[in-house]
Image (spheres, rainbow, N blue to C red):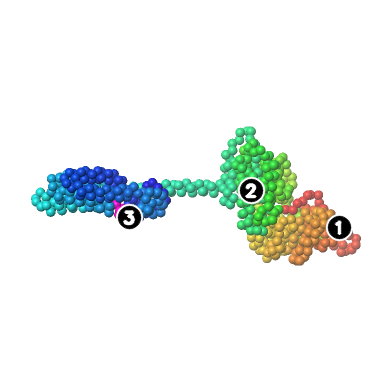
Amino acid sequence: MAGLKRKAPLTDAGVVEALIRRDQLASIRRATLVSLPVSTIIGGVIVAMANRYGHDTLGWAWFAAILIINIIRTSLCLTPLPPLAGEKSTARRFPALARLPVEKYLYFFWTSSLISGLLWSLIFLLCNGYTSPQATFYLTVVCGMTAGAVTTGVAYAIVPISFFMPVLLSVAGCLLYAGGFDNNALAATVLLYLLMITSISRQSEASFRTASRLKNEADAMAQSLKTAHENSVLIAEQMRYRATHDELTGLFNRTGFIQQVEQCTPNGRDTFCMMLLDLDGFKMVNDGFGHATGDRVLSEVAHRLREVLDGRFSVARIGGDEFAVFYVQQTSDELPDALATKLITAIGAPYLTFDSGRLGVSIGIYQSQDMNIAEMLTRADEALYAAKSGGRNRYHMFDAPLLARLSMKRDVERDLQRALAEKKLEVWYQPVFSNDGKNIINYEALLRWKHHKHGWISPADLVLTAAMAGLSEQLMRFIFGEICGMIQTLISLNLDHIFVAMNMSPRDASCLPIDECVLKGLKALNLPTHMLEIEVTEETAMDTIAVQDKINRLSEAGVRIAVDDFGAGYSSLSSLRKLNVNRIKIDRCFITGVTESANDQILVKTILKLGQALGLEVVAEGVETAEALHLLSDFGCELIQGYHLGYPAPKQEIITRLKKLEAQKKRALEFPGKIENEFILRCQHESAPL
């Protein structure tokens, strides 16, 4: 079967039959190729016998015909086996014949065998119809040739039958023609011999086909099992690859990255470096240009990482736009800070899809000789958080202050649930005033917790820790319950015109049932919906797919909606319209230096005009000086919030001040001009919005 390339094995009956036929052809070829030299030699002996007894011309003519047919049959034997259906022949000898189907080959073999048999049947011409004294020699030769044909043609009965049938019929015919009891008896014997070897040939072919079928079916089964095994191995490899690699970028995923890092064995001398990279501005690219562009950007970032980092570095995509790099410092000539600078430059280079400057990267770095992967990732993540807090395209090394902060976060996470259960958390309230500083419009609820070890914990850390500990909903319900209590108190003081604002983080707005919790809670306590305001950040306002239905349900029920930190992120007018926003709060970063910065003044005026055009209330938060208050009043900002007018304070203190304030108002009505307008509330505690 040289020169053939078989495709995937098939086991249907048609293909098995084709394989059997080709096995028959291969066997006939081998046997014929062995028998033809013997046939030629015997033919030469017959020519010699014919020359001796005066039949030289006829003998040589007969032998020449035998040589020609033997050459033809030898050519058929030397031609490469033809291909099966679906196979491609690569034969170089007799290419025209090699392209013929198996059945055509078999046809040529039995027809050439028939021609050879017809030539051998003419031997009677050399011995006077088997009546000359040499008849015994010729009969012996004929019997030997026919018996040999049977043994060499066991695979395909028609080939030996087509050879010995004309030969033996010729012998029987000549003997019957000669007459006599002896000749007739010999003729009958020849005919009986003919029937016997014909039957033997057919039985031999049947046995050969059975053996061939069993062999080919076994081969097909073995090949099928082999293919199934190879496929299962391939599928297992693919599943293993998919389990350890990111499909989009081809980098390791978190699982594969950890497995790769675990292969490094610490020897006490090596220093390991873990870097976490988070893309700056990727959400803006995703929202502005679509997720398809975002995917192309992630693939391009992965490509740039591969260009900078060779095989000594383990690189992974472990989150949406977060990547990780791990390496042994002794294997690289570059220090971590130099490498981080190179990565920031590579990732910050312009992209074809959008204008340059939109995308950057922040990097957190942690170095250690201790191979604790979970701890390395945690500390690198803490460093990443510090880098992002400092702005875009920055890196930060994990240091002692971050270690203290990490320890604090772990303590807070451990103690938060108990603090919630024991109600050790507090909700303080900061007022929002009219621009004259005399009238309180509403209060903003701010979360406070004084930890026994770390002191006051910032609301941002509390919210993040609650999310990590799975306590977000419990914390949200606690804050809402406290706010409901404050609303009840305001109603009891006949101050139902003052409402309370509740901050909602992006994650809580997306993941928690805020609409269900708020509406059911207000209804259960019979509280008016207009006395509650939900403050969401610009990021939440942009994420309309996740929060639009929840916010709209609240708005339709009468709950006020405000966008906090407006101007610091990336809002769209359509988002403000879809969310039925009542109020926007100018981010404190524009207010802090508004008296000195012309740019901040322009931005503040623009936001005020935008709010006026859209019919929205505008609050300036972070007002800490009288100069800023007067400037904002001149700009037409009607609502003010900040330390200059009022610090956050606990509920009881707020209630006490409200009672004093109402008493002062009554006295002012009774004795106009005698009571100064001192409604500015102060306290000594620090504050930061939730």
- The amino acid pointed to by label 1 is Glu
Q: Is residue 506 magenta?
A: no
Marks 3 and 1, how far apart in space? 115 Å
- Which element carries disc 2, helix, strand or loop? helix
Lower sequence index among marks 1 and 2: 2
The residue that mark 2 highlights is 304
Residue 35 is left or right of residue 569, and the answer is left
The residue that mark 1 highlights is 678
- The amino acid pointed to by label 2 is Arg
Q: Residue 588: percent from the left, percent from the top? A: 77, 55
- Who is closer to the viewer here, 178 or 431? 178
The residue depicted at 42 percent of the width and 51 percent of the height is 7
Lower sequence index among marks 2 and 3: 3
- The amino acid pointed to by label 3 is Lys
Residue 104 got which mark?
Answer: 3
Lower sequence index among marks 3 and 1: 3
Residue 252 is left or right of residue 132, and the answer is right
- Who is closer to the viewer here, 129 or 535? 129
Which stretch is magenta? 105-109
- Farthest residue, direction right: 674
Mark closer to the observer (3, 1):
3
Marks 1 and 2, how far apart in space? 62 Å
Q: Residues within 10 Å of mark 2 (few under 14, many from 20)?
A: some
Q: Kindly report the secondary structure that dominates the magenta region of the rendered protein.
A: helix
- Who is closer to the viewer here, 40 or 585? 40
Mark closer to the observer (2, 3):
3
Q: Are marks 3 and 1 in contact (CB under 8 Å)?
A: no
- Which element carries disc 1, helix, strand or loop? loop
- Who is closer to the viewer here, 334 or 493? 334
Q: Residue 311: percent from the left, percent from the top? A: 60, 42
Marks 2 and 3, how far apart in space? 61 Å
Q: Is residue 555 above or below residue 653?
A: below
